Amino acid sequence: MQQITSLKQMQAQALQFKREGKKIALVPTMGALHEGHLKLVEVARQEADVVVMSIFVNPTQFGPGEDFEQYPRDLAKDAKLALEKGVDILFLPEVSEIYPEGDQTQVIVTELTRGLCGPFRPGHFRGVTTVVAKLFLIVQPDQACFGEKDYQQLKVIERMVSDLHFPVQIIAVPTLREADGLARSSRNVYLKPEDRVQALKISQAIFKVQESVAGGQRKVSALIQIAKEILSSAPDLETEYLEIVDTKTLEPLEQIQKEARVLIAAHLPGVRLIDNGALSV
Ligand code: AMP
């Protein structure tokens, strides 16, 4: 596995792969790797000749008062996991190179970022789309893998790729969970053991809504009520949003008709958790 920090070197290497007719798959991450990230690498491996994983804790997607400084960083451990999983290039750009002095260009996706996490994390998606656009231009992947765990992010990236005609195929990878249902996340390390059982209420609420839809319930207000009851049984869990939306527009629905998604964001002391699940009829 090669480690590359320089943008120019990464871009030159990507061009060389292209000349050799090799397909490149990119797995963008912020590090603190877990099984969810490694699943993305597995999928990337099936699709491409060269797997590039980027690790970049992107400052522009963190708001004031968020956890940019404390975000878990362990490069030695990440590099070992990436190597074991068969990553070919670990791309580790510097903040000062990604955002050169005087930088004033951003990529903004409008409608899809208005709801869900949008209002609670102002500027977050603009930071994500801007950095992903830069990574695409540097690494020039044929494919890029993103997790359904960050469902709104996935939809926003798909929109950006389509609107800006990036020649990149976006591959969505289902959420990897712990045995008890908790969605894997780099931020789970912030969870105190006594809070973990409360965190489980989020995935339990999602599974219960999925069961109810499978059992014939189509009314969103009833489904929301079912989820609320489960979430409210955790005394310290503060729900930020609980919504059932159309998978294309991310607009709230009243009835489940076709493809829908239930999404939850909630806080426990010192940690914000998000999760979601598919609802299909
Ligand atoms: P992050 O390092 O948190 O920015 O995540 C990097 C990529 O891994 C994103 O595409 C995430 O959606 C994806 N990811 C994070 N957690 C999971 C998970 N539990 N299952 C699948 N993909 C995930």
Image (spheres, rainbow, N blue to C red):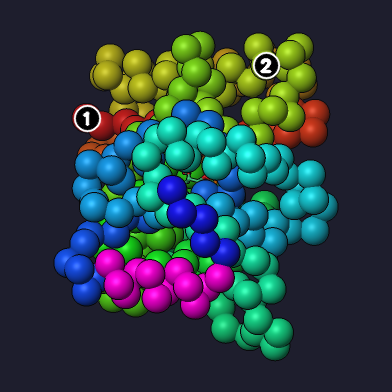
Percent position of residue 187, x then y? 66, 35
Q: Main secondary structure of the magenta part?
A: helix
Residue drawn where x is 55% and y is 42% of the image: 79
Percent position of residue 227, x then y? 52, 22
- Quadrant of residue 46 within the rendered picture: top left
Farthest residue, direction left? 21
* Nearest to N terminus: mark 1 or mark 2: 2
Q: Count how many numbered circles sit on residues in the image.
A: 2
Dot 1: within a 10 Å radius of its alpha carbon, few (fewer than 14), some, or many (20 or more) residues? few
In this view, 101 is above or below 84: below
**Observer able to see residue 242:** no
- The residue under label 1 is 281
Residue drawn where x is 64% and y is 54% of the image: 57
- Point out the image quarter for the C terminus: top left
- Assess whether residue 8 is covered by the magenta stretch: yes
In this view, 79 is above or below 50: above
Ligand 1 contact, mark 1 (Cβ < 8 Å): no
Mark 1–mark 2 Cα distance, whole angstroms, equals 32 Å
* Closer to us: 219 or 214: 214
* Closer to us: 201 or 49: 49
What stretch of residues is rendered in magenta?
6-17
- Assess whether residue 216 is covered by the magenta stretch: no
- Quadrant of residue 259 within the rendered picture: top left
Residue drawn where x is 58% and y is 49% of the image: 30
Q: Which mark is residue 196?
A: 2
Amino acid type of the residue tagged 1 in the rendering: Val
Mark 2, secondary structure of its residue: helix
Mark 1, secondary structure of its residue: loop
